[in-house]
Image (cartoon, grey):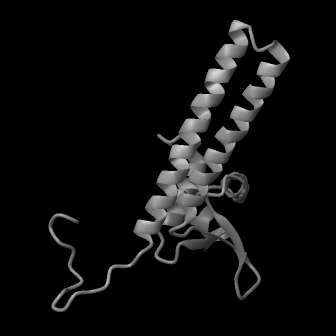
């Protein structure tokens, strides 16, 4: 919720992230969260539209909602694209207002800011994805226990 998601969407997303399988059916979500199927339906529709979950069919042809390690990358990239679209809209406003006006200068500054931020977010997300999706090779004598500084 602190990231701006409404309460029910946050609950559904948390429920999916905290299951070992990373996926549940709508009825399983409703049962675990003790809410109506309609509440689950609304939440999963929103989460899917934001790229935070995926809808799949299981072997019994039931819809399952799932999350994976790539969901935050996809969501971050979608947010960066949204910022780029907003920057383009601001640039169009510059043309409408006339480039010499204070309002147009403000819109141009907004566009430049959003371009810069979106570029940085995209670059950071791609670098993080590359680093975090690279599995470290086990060294001889290593154990499955985390080291104290990597918790």
Choose top left, top right, bottom left or bottom right for residue 96.
top right
Judge left or right: residue 44 versus residue 139. right
Image position of 87 with respect to 35: above or below: above
Q: Residue furthest right?
A: 96
Q: Position of residue 88 (x, y in %)?
A: 74, 34
What's the residue at 68%, 42% (across, down)? 82
Q: Residue furthest front?
A: 100
Q: Is residue 79 visible?
A: yes
Q: Is residue 14 visible?
A: no
Q: Residue furthest bottom?
A: 140
Choose top left, top right, bottom left or bottom right for residue 146.
bottom left
What's the residue at 62%, 46% (across, down)? 79
In depth, the one of 141 and 54 nearer the eye is 141
What's the residue at 54%, 38% (across, down)? 117
Q: Position of residue 37 (x, y in %)?
A: 70, 59
Image position of 35 with respect to 120: above or below: below
Counting the numbered discs, the total is 0
Image position of 137 with respect to 83: above or below: below
Q: Position of residue 46 (x, y in %)?
A: 70, 51
What's the residue at 72%, 52% (across, down)? 42
Q: Position of residue 151 (x, y in %)?
A: 22, 65
Image position of 85 with respect to 34: above or below: above
């Amino acid at each position: 919720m602190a990231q701006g998601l409404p309460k029910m969407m946050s609950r559904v997303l948390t429920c999916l992230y905290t299951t070992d399988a990373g996926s549940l059916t709508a009825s399983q979500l409703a049962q675990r969260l003790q809410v109506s199927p309609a509440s689950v339906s609304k939440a999963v529709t929103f989460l899917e539209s934001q790229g935070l979950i995926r809808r799949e069919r299981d072997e019994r042809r039931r819809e399952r909602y799932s999350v994976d390690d790539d969901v935050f990358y996809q969501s971050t990239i979608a947010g960066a694209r949204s910022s780029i679209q907003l920057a383009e809209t601001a640039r169009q406003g510059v043309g409408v207002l006339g480039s010499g006006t204070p309002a147009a200068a403000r819109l141009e500054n907004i566009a430049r800011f959003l371009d810069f931020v979106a570029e940085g977010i995209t670059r950071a997300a791609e670098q993080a994805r590359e680093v975090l999706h690279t599995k470290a090779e086990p060294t001889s004598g290593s154990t499955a226990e985390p080291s104290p500084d990597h918790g």
